[in-house]
Image (cartoon, rainbow, N blue to C red):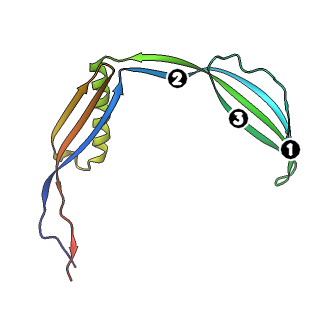
């Protein structure tokens, strides 16, 4: 038999803090691709292209495909494919107010996902600290929650 004597309502605080640099460098793929092929016989490798890609900055993904004769029988030969993706750097400079808004929205969303009953939120506080190169934001939610538990009576 389980018995609950009463509800215990308490103030519970949820907080998150994060720092954001005002100057950020984002690295993105441009969409340009180069592929280079190799054939491997056991430990021996033949490269069809000896040169590096034409890109100054790039990301490389290497894949090997073994040659299959039957469903479970593989030959000691594989084809290697090196795919080079061109990368570009883009510098983003945020104002302090933009950075505060971005961080505040992000932190509020993260905390809201943790709170089960959003109707019981009683207060939201946003604390900020600024420097010449970064902004730090702390978001604190105050909610009323039932912290009582059911106990088995013996």
Spatial CA distance of label 1 from label 2 is 37 Å
First-in-chain label (1 vs 2): 2
Q: Which residue bears the numbered disc 2?
A: 27
Side (left or right) of 107 relative to 2: right
Residue 151, quarter of the rendered image: bottom left
First-in-chain label (3 vs 2): 2
Spatial CA distance of label 3 from label 2 is 20 Å
How many marks the image carries: the answer is 3
| Disc 3, SS | strand
Image quarter where the C terminus lies is bottom left
Side (left or right) of 44 relative to 105: right
Residue 91, quarter of the rendered image: top left
Q: Residue at x 74, y 21 (%)?
A: 52
Residue 115: x %, y % from top left:
26, 47
User: Which of 103/122 is in front?
Assistant: 103
Q: Which residue bears the numbered disc 3?
A: 62
Q: Which residue bears the numbered disc 1?
A: 42
Mark number, residue 141: none
How packed is label 1: few (under 14 Cα within 10 Å), some, or many (20 or more)?
A: few
């Amino acid at each position: 038999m389980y018995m609950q004597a009463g509800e215990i309502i308490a103030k519970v605080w949820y907080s998150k803090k994060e720092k954001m640099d005002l100057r950020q460098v984002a690295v993105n793929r441009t969409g340009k691709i180069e592929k280079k092929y190799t054939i491997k016989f056991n430990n021996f490798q033949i490269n069809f292209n000896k040169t590096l890609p034409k890109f100054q900055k790039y990301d490389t993904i290497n894949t090997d495909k073994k040659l299959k004769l039957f469903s479970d029988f593989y030959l000691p030969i594989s084809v290697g494919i090196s795919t080079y993706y061109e990368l570009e750097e883009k510098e983003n400079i945020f104002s302090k107010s933009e950075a505060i808004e971005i961080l505040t929205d992000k932190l509020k969303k993260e905390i809201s996902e943790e709170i089960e009953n959003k109707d019981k939120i009683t207060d939201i506080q946003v604390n900020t600290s600024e420097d010449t190169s970064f902004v730090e934001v702390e978001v604190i939610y105050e909610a009323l929650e039932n912290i009582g538990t059911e106990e088995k009576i013996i």
